[in-house]
Image: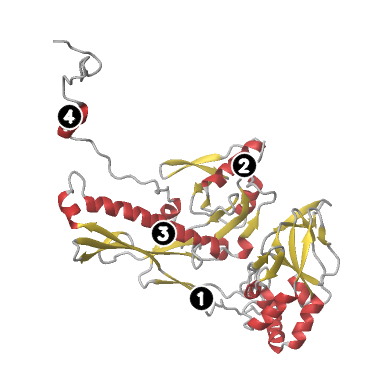
Amino acid sequence: MTVDAGYDIEADGAGNQQSLGTAAARNLATTTKSAPQMQGISSRWLLRMLPWVNVAGGTYRVNRRLTYSVGRGRVSFAQTADRVQVVPPTLRELPLLRGFEDDAMLAAIADRFTQREFAPGEVITEAGRGADEIYLVAHGKINKLGDGKYGDQTVVGVLADGDHFGDESLVEEDARWAYTATASTSGTLMVLPRTVFQSLVDQSPELLVQIAQYLASAQQSTNKHGEAAIEMSAGHEGEIDLPGTFVDYELSPREYELSVAQTVLRIHSRVADLYNQPMNQIEQQLKLTVEALRERQEHELINNSEFGLLHNADHEQRIHTHHGPPTPDDLDELLCRRRDTTLFLAHPRTIAAFGRECNRLGLYPDTVDLQGSRVPAWRGVPVLPCNKIPITDGHTSSILALRMGEDNQGVVGLHQTGLPDEFEPSLSVRFMGINEKAVISYLVTAYYSAAVLVPDALGVLENVEIARPRD
């Protein structure tokens, strides 16, 4: 007998098999199996870090102090070839036209805007000169420049797609520019002269009433956040008449209703009966379904048009990068707009772009320990990855900064626990029966939403360039 060491000999020189082959031998062997795997599972840091509030009634009302300031949203545009038009309903994002209901007049105002192209370095407005036009930025980026205390020129703000400036000139005859606006890129402006707007006002009594209401709101006593002021006296001596006051509330506070993500999981009874060893088929199917449902939940918390964080950030809390890529200066500006920032949230490619900028400047971001993982941080605030933040046109994205917690007037997640057939908090799995084809059905449901308690709890750094520059 010949013994071979190191490998099997299955055939002699004539090609006749002399021993059992491995392919046949596997039929008598027990294989070692893994549980079903899937690539779609991410770290889901947002779901892990959000403080969740139980909403027993399915609706969460955010009560705030009465605010007189109307906010400043983004105007939208429609483009056909090289011709740009203002989308009339979005003109309600101008403080002057907030709540104006005459769609025909809005369309008339939109038609009066004229298109103007600008080039990098072009001066659009000059500080101290009369302001008699309103500008809507259809495309491009513009720097607002002011004079520093020591005579140097500083960037006091950045305007980009959808922003507007000069709207105060529509109601103030002697308005003057407080800053110089200079284009940092090429782009397109939509321009409306005050004289043209005034001619429309003369034709519309409703628009005249709208302006009167706007001016009356602007004269209310407010703090720097636009909230109704609480009158008080401090530093006085003797017996003086103290001011009386009260804290006024919003009459129509915002309410968040729980949203839902659902699917029906179907499993054939034959599979559940005969192929449940060594792994339970229903459990494995349910495990992967729940993972996919949680991924969709995080996507909705970021992108949903009603309650998603990207769509619910206040305009005053939205800023643009100064030069394109996310720099330490940009994150510092985002950080300084709120107290007690809990975390930054960014796409992994955005985090990589920030790392490149730090390397270019010779900086080394910190790392912090978070739930047993070492994660990058800036100024001690964790920078967490979230692949649900969209990348626009393959090269721009956003960075979110969040203060979290109900006690801290921050961002909170909303859900309802104690559901019938609850599988995980606010996620239920209900048996729906077996149909005539012997298919078992389970209804898998998750309820969730998110609320921003005060505007400065959430900030967004927009138009962040993440594409790697050419060497």
Judge by depth and name the residue closer to the eye, 199 or 447: 199
Q: Which mark is residue 468?
A: 2
Which image quadrant for residue 94? bottom right
Residue 234 in the image, given as x and y percentages of width and height = 66, 69
Comes first in the chain, label 4 or label 3: 4
Label 1, residues with CA under 10 Å away: few <14, some 14-19, many ≥20: few
Which image quadrant for residue 208? bottom right
Cα distance in 3D space between marks 2 and 1: 44 Å
Which residue is identified by label 1? Answer: 253
Label 2, residues with CA under 10 Å away: few <14, some 14-19, many ≥20: few
Instruction: Mark 2 vs mark 3: give the one in front.
Output: 2
Q: Residue at x 25, y 18 (%)?
A: 7
Cα distance in 3D space between marks 4 and 3: 47 Å
Comes first in the chain, label 2 or label 1: 1
Q: Secondary structure at mark 4?
A: helix
| Badge count | 4
Q: Which mark is residue 25?
A: 4
Instruction: Mark 4 vs mark 3: give the one in front.
Output: 4
Which residue is identified by label 3? Answer: 297
Comes first in the chain, label 2 or label 3: 3
Comes first in the chain, label 4 or label 1: 4
Amino acid under disc 3: Gln
Kindly give the residue lying farthest to the left in the view shown: 1
In the rendered structure, are the residues bearing label 2 and label 1 in contact, judged by CB atoms less than 8 Å apart? no
